[in-house]
Every structure is written in C-alpha cells, then in structure tokens.
Image: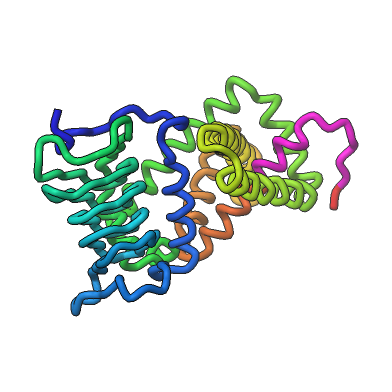
Amino acid sequence: MSYQNTTINRILFPQIPFWHLIGGTIAILLFQFVIFAQTPNITTLEDEQTLIIEGNSDTQVFSFGKNVIVKQQAKEVFVFGGNVTIEGRVEGDVGTIGGSVIQKENAFIGGDVIVLGGTYQSEIQKPLRNAGKETVIIGIFEEELRNFAKNPTAVFSPTLTWGFVAQRIVSVLFWFLISFFFTTISPGAVSRAVARFQLSSLKIVGIGFSGFLFTTIGIMLSVAFLPGYLSGVISLMMLILMFLAYVFGRVALQVSTGKLLQKYLLPESKHSETVAILLGVVAWTIILSIPYIWTFALLLLFSVSIGLVFTAKTKNQWQRV
C-alpha cells in the first residue's frame, strides 16, 4: 500500500513516541522562534520562510512557522506550521503540525512520521524507511494550524466573524445539554459542589490551581524521564482525569453563576433550575469569548474543577472565606 494514501496506521503509545512531538511543540510555543544547534549547515532562503539543512550532522531541528528542507542529513525534524521536505537522510523521527511531510525519491527516514493537519507524500511507491516504524496522519485543521503558527497571538484575541458567533451558539447549546444532563442524573453531587464553592471559593481555587500545576509538571517529568510507553500511559490517564474534572467543575460553576444571576435579574416567581443553567452557560460562554480575558477564565475553570474534585469527600466543615 502506498504511504501517500495512509490515514492512520496504528496509534499505540508503546510504539510511537507521539509525546516527543508534543514536548517539541510546547518548547516551540514558549520560545516562538526556530531552535537549533549553532551550525553553519543551516541556512535560510531569501523569502525568510524556508530553512535549508545542508551537510551531515546530528542536529535536531525545531522550526516554528517555517518550511524545512533537509538536503543531506539531520537527526530529527519537528515543524509547527510548515512543510518538511526530506531530500537526504533523517535518522530519527519527522513530525509536523499544520504542514505536510514530503519524502523525495532517494530520501531516507529512520524513525516515525507524525503529521497533524497535513499529509505524508512520497515520490516512490515504497519509500526508504526502517522496518517497523509507524506513520500517523491526522489530516484536519491544516489551514487553522498554519495561521496560528504565523500569528500565534491570534489565539488570545480571536476575530469576531459569523463563524466565531456560530461556534459560540453551538457551545451554548452543548454546555446547556451537558449541564442539564448532570443536574438531572446527579443533582446531589452538583448541589454539593455548588455549596462548597460558594462557602469556600478561595480555598477551592487554591487547591485546584496547585493540583493543576502539579499535574502539568508530572506530565512533563514523565515525558522527560520515563520510558515512552509508560510516560504515554501516565500522561493519557492524567489528561483524561483533568478533562473529566473540567466537565464536572464547569457544570457546577455554570449552575452557581446562573443562580447568582437569576437572583439579581429575575423575580423570585421566575426562578427555576433550567433558567439558572441557561444563564450560567451563556455567561461563561461570553467570558470565554473575551480576548485575552478568556485565558485567565479558562485557568480559573480548571482550578475550580480540580479543587472541587479534590474536596469532594472531605469531612471538614467549610467556612466562608
């Protein structure tokens, strides 16, 4: 089967160092420039959008918003928002987010090929690869990821478009259904979470932020020091737990906010659980749509969510702060 038509070849953490790509991407986002060893073998074309890797070296190339062409040899190549063209030899992995990997006729890739938001193209039917290496291709959001690489600050200040408004309307509907579902099947758990947050909001935020911080550090340390299969499993478990905590915490916070708004905006005769949920969902959707402010609001949501989970079974009496 041609590699050109490959969509997803098995995704197994013990076999694919996918978290290496995530770690490289985080480093790229933090520094927002191209990071590579000081070597004369790397040059930039006149358009300032393409890096040329020449000569034989063990250079690990990380590029942000630029295309990379490997003329001769490199150790590994990871690109965010650009294409990777292999004309020579790459001993390790090749990955790109928001771009494509192009392997020329006589080129060789020794490691895995990981593409998110693009394609993997080879000029020959059976490209030169080491046996047993994996190819992972998820061809979605290519244009969005490219635009983000060129203008990363746009994520903090989204443009007001009809598409943006439509997304927020869908978000309101989605979170209203989720919140209504949770309050229907487990009203006691949601009510207790709302009560805990109202009685001791600062303590819950502090506990949740500490938990969020330690969880993030734990994921980074596991990726850095543990074997690939073990760090993958641990990281996946932590991310799933954080996601579940976020969903429950956001539901509780939306209900709490909705009840507060309902108290001041509507007469008591009009109060209802459904109206409170709707008001809370709309309020948080608007907050999470405000440029720059949404980043702090999202951090607050994660902190509250994790804090509510950590304090769910405490027997201490919560006092108002």
State the residue in front, 86 or 308: 86
Residue 129, position as x, y percentages in the image = 24, 39
Residue extending furthest front?
Answer: 56
Residue 150 or residue 298, whichever sits in front: 150
User: Is 315 contained in the magenta span?
Assistant: yes
Q: Nearer the viewer, residue 100 or 204?
A: 100
Q: Would residue 262 be seen by someone viewing this image from the given angle?
A: no
Counting from the top left corner in percent of width and height, residue 89 is at 25, 53
Q: Is residue 313 magenta?
A: yes
Residue 216 position (above or below residue 148): above
Q: Kindly indicate the quadrant of the structure image that contains residue 71.
A: bottom left
Answer left or right for 16 relative to 227.
left
Colouring chosen for the image of the structure: rainbow
Q: Seen from this angle, which residue lies furthest bottom?
A: 46
Relative to 157, residue 269 above or below: above
Q: Position of residue 161 (x, y in %)?
A: 29, 59
- Residues in magenta, as a range: 304-319
Q: Which residue is found at the position 62% from the left and 39% from the top? A: 249
Q: Residue at x 79, y 29 (%)?
A: 313
Point out the image quarter for the N terminus.
Answer: top left
Q: Residue at x 51, y 40 (%)?
A: 278
Does 113 appear above or below 240? below
Q: Is residue 318 left or right of residue 170?
A: right
Residue 152 position, x and y percent, is 39, 65
